[in-house]
Image: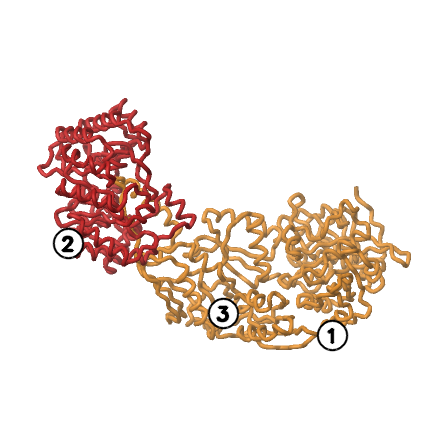
Chain colours: A red, B orange
Amino acid sequence: MHWPFCLAKCPYCDFNSHVRETIPQERFASALRKELAHDAARTGRRPLRSIFFGGGTPSLMDPETVAALIEDASRYFDAEPDLEITLEANPTSVERAKLASFREAGVNRISLGIQSLDDASLRFLGREHSASQAIAALETARSLFARVSFDLIYARPGQSLSEWSGELDRALSLASDHLSLYQLTIEQGTKFEALYRQGRFHLPDDEQAARLYERTADIAGRHGLLPYEISNYARPGAESRHNLTYWRYQDYIGIGPGAHGRLTIGDDLLAIRRHRAPEPWAGRVEQGGCGSTEEIPLSAEERGREALLMGLRLTEGISCAAFRTRTSREIGECLDPRILDAALEEGYLTFDRERLIATREGRLRLEALLSALVL
Amino acid sequence: MYRAMTATPLSQIRNFSIIAHIDHGKSTLADRLIQSCGALTAREMKDQILDNMELEQERGITIKAQTVRLTYPAKDGKTYILNLMDTPGHVDFAYEVSRSLAACEGSILVVDASQGVEAQTLANVYQAIDANHEIVPVLNKVDLPAADVERVRAQIEEVVGIPADDAVEVSAKTGLNIEGVLEALVTRLPPPEGNAEAPLQALLVDSWYDPYLGVIILVRIKEGTLRRGDKIRMMQAGSTYHVDQVGVFLPKMTPVDSLGPGEMGYINAAIKTVADVAVGDTVTLDRTPAAQPLAGFKPSIPVVWCGLFPIDADDFEKLRDSLGKLRLNDASFHFEAETSAALGFGFRCGFLGLLHLEIIQERLSREFNLDLIATAPSVVYKMHMTDGTQEDLHNPADMPDLAKIEKIEEPWIKATILVQDEYLGSVLTLCSERRGIQMDLTYVGNRAMAVYRLPLNEVVFDFYDRLKSLTRGYASFDYQMDGYEESDLVRISILVNQEPVDALAFVAHRTVAETRGRAICSKLKDLIPRQLFKIAIQASIGSRIIARETLGALSKDVTAKCYGGDISRKRKLLEKQKEGKKRMRQFGKVEIPQSAFLAALKMD
């Protein structure tokens, strides 16, 4: 469920987010519910493993809307007993005050956009909260929810290994069982892109970024959090089930402006994309029940590529059997044999009858690996 | 309207050329001569009208010979016909120069009165002396404060070895004493000889392509008479043509009924391309041919070769068209299609010399808007094979197996370098580093003239640039071909992950092979972006590795975040990268962007 509104646009963020003077809560609440009902009618009853409220800033939603959407989904689908319902929240005091009502609404996992525990860095990142507000929000969240995760952005301009180690150590002492640790990247169309191009700040070079990445994994590991994906760390069993669905290339419905879905309908696996702009999306939903701008059946080759792109981000890699079922292809058919051999020899990949796995060395160079490896 | 030429007596014709170093004022002097003979009105006068190619004007050099017929009423009361033959000023066009000189009986030697004699001037003046020319020294720019007439006069006598006490002192720029030059031409140069009734012998001096008229050829009549409507025969090529038009340059093309002995003019005869006619050939009449062609004909042969590749592969056909169009006007360069694993489709091109190469390259980029990359220039090696056959090699990539080669010969040049005393030491060091053998070293005032024999192969390898930087641009350099000699040459291959990069292969003397191989490997190491796998960059002679660099694998390349569920974006990015790989060259398990090789070649 994509809630597309934010109080302010962060300079690094290229997600589909929009700032409005007043948010038309009711209109968007009913449009989200209508689009969900529309897709549920197409799929029929299927098992439901997770719901994720992302954005944008979904903690700006009315808790009643969240509650209604959870109720609807539970009615349309067969919810698994341990259904995971995550909501992304910003650690401002206003949103912190709403956390209890989100729990009332049925949310059972909170993901906080903390980004940094350093006030100067928070200002650089254009965040609306301070480090102490972040810690307070985290404490509240932990007192209310059994499962709490938060995001940090590292490999920031000028960040040294020891500074980051200290910040991460503190973060881990506050963490429960899940963390998303992203290196700062410059995305197209963001304010950071313009500043970076003007040379207003510099990023760590690849070697420094690699050292920071490795140090991150070491420190998280010492606290018992293991990397299960490029940027995600969890105590075994506490992985985000929702995100695993993306990476394992299983079906998901995306509701809301700019949301994406992968949905099996009959023999087709559809790539679904909703209109990005909030109001036109809502207009489409109000008229025809859904805001899709694209519903394209994916070829076997495209499915193979997508499964590889996502699956190799995971520490567990890709299950050969699941790959075959999902794509109607063998993994081997989708790979350049020369690059596969070289990557196996170099220790970037392991490959047996069961799984194809990118090793830590392989994951560190995944973009280059994928672009050479995947046919 | 055809102008009936009043048959000018031979005694009232003078044919001359002008020899000068770049910037010494040749074109300005020519302009003044034309102007003072009234060939053009002031309004028609455009500075340096003889250099009419854009590039010629800009670089101040003459690429194609031009000619103009002047009418001069001399002090002796007679009116003379003065034919000015402008000659290319560079050794690359030495053969064209020699043919132009063969069309005249005398030369004006223009020397800048402040700069003095330069190496290039020397080579041309010696050619004029070889052509039995009477030489009139002219000291130009005598009005400048820096002019040192006496010193330069002495220099001409010492260095060139011709008397200079009656040198004409002028300022072409201000028009000072142009009359003196014209009088010297009339009184000091011999008139041409020839018999109007003899079988036609006309020297083919130049040819060029005119978009309206087709090929125009420039001739100097030695014997006999050429008329409009004649059927002519090229004595070397054997081809025949009907003469549609004969004419002279005033300097505008002006048709005449006939050209007699001693005259210069043009022929338009429906010739399709300049490749059909060769400079130096003898034009005669088909019906009453001369018994013998004029002496000294030789076809022009490229001495420097390189590969030209379009940076954008889609420009290949455009490059082919453009080379064809240039060849319409310049038969002296050659091209054939070539495929390189590293650079794609292009052409192997042969040139008369390095300047010729540079000019063609520049015209391709300027007139045809082509973005090109050139491989390192190669000279032509003579390969004597063990089976007794002989082959010419002009592409190092084509070098046969060493076991099949009995011996290799390389071309040598005789180079003349004039340089200020303070830079002489570094110039001598450069020459000996390049396997040069000193033939002569003389001082003229504060300048030295060094004559060296050098392998041409060492000169095409950044010699000019080094010379320029060592002497802050003050050295003047010229050379002429000086035969072939056996040499201990090896082909150095550059290998990327054990696979040869054809475009980077080169031939060098064994003694410098390792140093150059190492330099290229280290340059490539800096230019190739780090890849997924480590890359071995090696230089080898046959199977022996002489230099090696290892480029480590890239240390990190992964996007931290995956846009919530937007897999399409990542897939499309991947698919786009696959498209982009058309610009990549596969070397085993790594793909290297063509741009890295282009950059490596550009730095040479």
Residue ID at (22%, 42%): A112
Sequence-first tag of 3 and 1: 1
Mark 3 element type: strand
Which residue corresponds to mark 2?
A: A224
**Residue B269, position in %: x, y?**
69, 48
Which of the labelled discs sits on residue A338, or is there none?
none
Please tell me whether residue B104 is drawn above or below residue B441 in the rendered image: above
Quarter where residue B295 is shown: bottom right
Give the residue type that dot 1 points to: Glu
Residue A47 visible in this rendered orientation of the protein: yes
- For the residues labelled 2 and 1, the Cα–Cα distance comes to 92 Å
Count every numbered label the image shows and give the total: 3
Q: Nearer the viewer, mark 2 or mark 1?
A: 2
Q: Chain of mark 1?
A: B
Q: CA distance from mark 2 to mark 3?
A: 71 Å
Residue B383: assigned label: 3
- The answer to whether residue B387 shows anywhere in this view is no
Kindly identify which residue carries mark 1: B158
Q: Quadrant of residue B413?
A: bottom right
Q: Is residue A362 above or below residue B407?
A: above
Please tell me whether mark 3 or mark 1 is closer to you in this view: 1
Q: Residue B428: horizontal and vertical position, in percent?
A: 58, 75
> Helix, strand, or loop for circle 2?
loop
Pick the quarter of the image with the N terminus of chain B: top right
Horizontal side of A339 relative to B322 (left or right) equals: left
